[in-house]
Image (cartoon, rainbow, N blue to C red):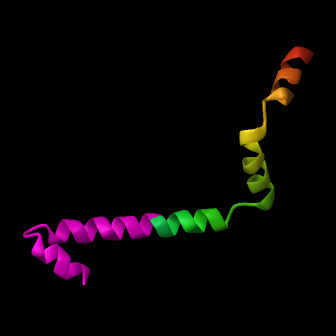
Amino acid sequence: MLRDIFKSLGNFENYGLISMVIFVIFFILLIIHTMSLKTGDVDEYSRMPLDDGAKEKDEIHDI
């Protein structure tokens, strides 16, 4: 199906196929990376948008 679509574009079928393969490989690697994250790291990342950096400010004043 995809090959037919790319053939209708003319001489670009190889470029389309290569870009599709690169996208699929990148997406699979992204899923593998996401699934391999530790639970503690995910919890820390989820709190980052709500963290105002108060802990870092307190550490700077202690020095």
The chief SS type of the magenta part is helix
The quadrant holding residue 61 is top right
Q: Which residue is drawn at the image coordinates 87% and 23% (left, top)?
A: 59
Q: Position of residue 5 (x, y in %)?
A: 19, 77
Q: How many marks?
A: 0
In the depicted view, which residue is nearer to us: 34 or 9? 9
Location of the C terminus by quadrant is top right
Residue 63 visible in this rendered orientation of the protein? no
20 falls in the magenta region: yes
Decide: is 30 above or below 53: below
The quadrant holding residue 22 is bottom left
Residues rendered magenta in the picture: 1-26
Q: Which residue is drawn at the image coordinates 70% and 61% (left, top)?
A: 37
Q: Position of residue 38 (x, y in %)?
A: 75, 60
Q: Which residue is drawn at the image coordinates 86% and 29% (left, top)?
A: 55
Q: Position of residue 12 (x, y in %)?
A: 13, 67
Q: Position of residue 57 (x, y in %)?
A: 83, 22
Which residue is most to the front? 50
The quadrant holding residue 26 is bottom left
Location of the N terminus by quadrant is bottom left
Residue 3 visible in this rendered orientation of the protein? yes
